[in-house]
Amino acid sequence: MQLRVGFIFLLSMLGCQPSIGDHCLQSTDCSATGERLCDTSQPNGYCTIFNCQPNRCPSGSGCVETNASIFGCDYDDRHAPSRLGRQLCLKTCKQDSDCRLGEGYACIDPKKYGVLVLDNDQTEKVCLPLTTYNVGDAANDSEAPVCSVAGPDAEAFDAALGFQGDGGTTTDASDASTPDAAADASDASTD
């Protein structure tokens, strides 16, 4: 009987689990098991799953990557994931009323915020806070210097014969003018 009551309690707890995108104050508001976390950097918190995998978020949410590229640089999947990127599940939506509109959230196209959708369905909209921040075409108008692979000009390097490798000392065994060179020469003869 106790096992049956425990099983029913467990099922009822799973049925009451908050959804991705729900408000929260701490991670236990999102999940008692630690599966979902509270992103407190969002207005009134945002239940999410960090480090999600594409197409693996719970029903009604999608996996996205924020900061997929360095600000001012075009996205480059050759160097993905970005060192600044963060993958997380966001609530998917069709219209603003699907989101916490009264708390400042709206249903928006992730690309408007520079968010990369990782799921197969690239047309998904997600619930995000409303702001005036827009990465639109301004990011593509000019490339930031940090994106350039040219780098600074470097002096020519001559690796011809006679290069003095470690601080200008030679490793020629016949040059015993320094104590280190003499020790190296004797070491070389015993090997």
Image (tube, rainbow, N blue to C red):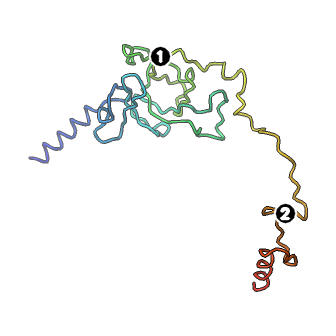
Q: Quadrant of residue 133?
A: top right
Residue found 71% across the figure and 20% down from its top: 141
From the top left corner, tell me how far across and down residue 101 is, in percent: 39, 14
- Residue found at the far right of this picture: 161
Q: What percent of the width, then of the height, locates residue 84? A: 56, 36
Indicate left or right for 35 with 132 as reference. left
Above or below residue 130? Residue 190 is below
**Compared with residue 93, is residue 87 higher up or lower down, i.e. above or below?**
below
Q: Height in image: 114 above or below 156?
A: above
Which residue was labeled with disc 1?
130
Residue 52 vs residue 132, the one in the foreground: 132
- Marks 1/2: CA distance? 61 Å
Within 10 Å of the Cα at label 2, are there few (<14), some (14-19), or many (20+) other Cα atoms? few
User: In x, y percent, where is residue 179?
Assistant: 78, 76
Residue 63's disc number: none
Residue at point 43%, 14% (across, down): 96
Which amino acid type is shown beneath numbered disc 1? Leu
Q: Would residue 160 be found to the left or right of residue 124 on screen? A: right
Q: Nearer the viewer, residue 185 or 134?
A: 185
Q: Amino acid at mark 2?
A: Gln
Say which residue appears at 87% left-offset and 49% top-offset.
156
Please tell me how crowded label 1 is: few (under 14), some (14-19), or many (20+) other residues with Cα within 10 Å: few
Q: Is residue 156 left or right of residue 30?
A: right
Q: How many marks do you count on the picture?
A: 2
Disc 2: which residue: 164
Residue 116 quadrant: top right
Give residue 117's position: percent from left, percent from top.
54, 30
Q: Earlier in the sequence, mark 1 or mark 2?
A: 1
Question: Which element is circle 2 on?
Answer: loop
Quarter of the image where the C terminus is located: bottom right
Mark 1 element type: loop
Nearest to the observer: residue 114 or residue 143: 143
